Image: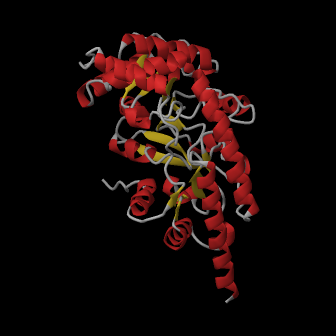
Amino acid sequence: MEIKPSGIRKFFDIAAEMDDVISLGVGEPDFQTPWHIRQAGIKSLQDGKTKYTSNRGIMELRKAVSDYMKEQISCEYDPATEVLISVGGSEAIDGAVRAIVGRGDEVLIVEPSFVCYEPIVKLAGGVPVIISTKAENEFRLTANELKSHITDRTKLLILPYPGNPTGAIMEQKDLEDIAEVLRETDIAVISDEIYSELTYTGQKHVSIASLDGMQERTVVINGFSKTYSMTGWRLGFACGPAPILQQMTKIHQFAIMSAPTTSQYAAIEALKNGRPDIEAMVEEYDMRRRLIVDGFNALGLDCFEPKGAFYAFPSIKSTGLSSEEFCERLLYSKKVAIVPGNAFGESGEGHVRASYCYSVNHIKEALHRIGEFLEEIKNEDKG
């Protein structure tokens, strides 16, 4: 089976071997995990809570997740049967795909999107079917695009909003149109909502699971990495119909056993008392978002306004370079690391992804160097 290595890690690994590189490449918050959350993890160790937990996760945490989902997306989940604590969101995605998809089943994947979906579908024996979204639609999935890709073999739709790498969101009306199409089918949905708390311009995240008739066919994936800056704690969760969660739990039992105990206790604190931390981080991200989008547009790299996550996805078509050429030359000539858009699917070609979960000074210096690089390209053309 041919599975390509991650295009994100490729450029990150090259940059790690170089000195004085400014990286906007990896989607990892520059904030530390809030201290009160770290303290909860430390206290669990001091109290000797170092054993395996239930396969599904600590019941107190599952109840906290259930409360959170009811508050945030107005969906009620039974913590005993409809919530699973996973090792990051990626494990939950893998488990959900393997629980739903049989050999030869077609899985609709919206692109550009996170790099793991297509390989996971292939590992499960499924057939990835790519739906390429467009910049002129702000990279939203339209009902017509969805309809045109459905066949009698379609089993699953992976819906990744707010989006990585584009920062795109789906509003209520967008999702209603998608739900109307799906209600006429038996297609299940995996809604990857890992960036659900990171939305801007007054846009509150809407989950497709909250729409009429959709909760019973949707597995919602979320976690703590982005929302609480807990990437290294490796903790996520899945909420969905009990029959699917039962199968996911079996896979989790045999492949993982249980999520890290210390991380689970820290996550309880995050869900119960972390709202002020989220608000502070979102405010900072929003300021950086406006800085980087304005910066790219001022440099002549057309950048639509991302309303979620922490990525900008400017077009570099005006340079005449491919995404890979642009990023490689920028890295070696100006020591700025960003990710080529085609790392997220062929529909990302002609764009690059720059993360703004870095400091203001970091972003400003990167934009300055990119400006110098663009001037060098112009002078080459004149020569």
Residue found at x 69% / y 69%: 318
Q: Nearer the viewer, residue 74 or 11?
A: 11
Residue 172 falls in image quadrant: top right
Q: Is residue 235 above or below residue 140?
A: above
According to the image, what is the colour scheme of the structure? secondary structure
Residue 259 falls in image quadrant: top left
Give the percent coordinates (x, y) of residue 141: 64, 41
Q: Could you tell whether 216 is left or right of 304 in the image? A: left
Q: Is residue 324 above or below residue 6?
A: below
Give the percent coordinates (x, y) of residue 120: 38, 42
Judge whether residue 184 can be spotted in this image: no
Q: Could you tell whether 337 is left or right of 92 in the image? A: right
Q: Could you tell whether 350 is left or right of 11 in the image? A: right
Residue found at x 70% / y 86%: 382
Find the residue positioned furthest to the bottom: 383
Give the percent coordinates (x, y) of residue 285: 64, 40
Give the percent coordinates (x, y) of residue 274: 54, 22
Residue found at x 43% / y 14%: 62
Task: For the C terminus, give its image quadrant.
Answer: bottom right
Residue found at x 42% / y 15%: 61
Q: Nearer the viewer, residue 7 or 267?
A: 267
Judge whether residue 90 can be spotted in this image: yes
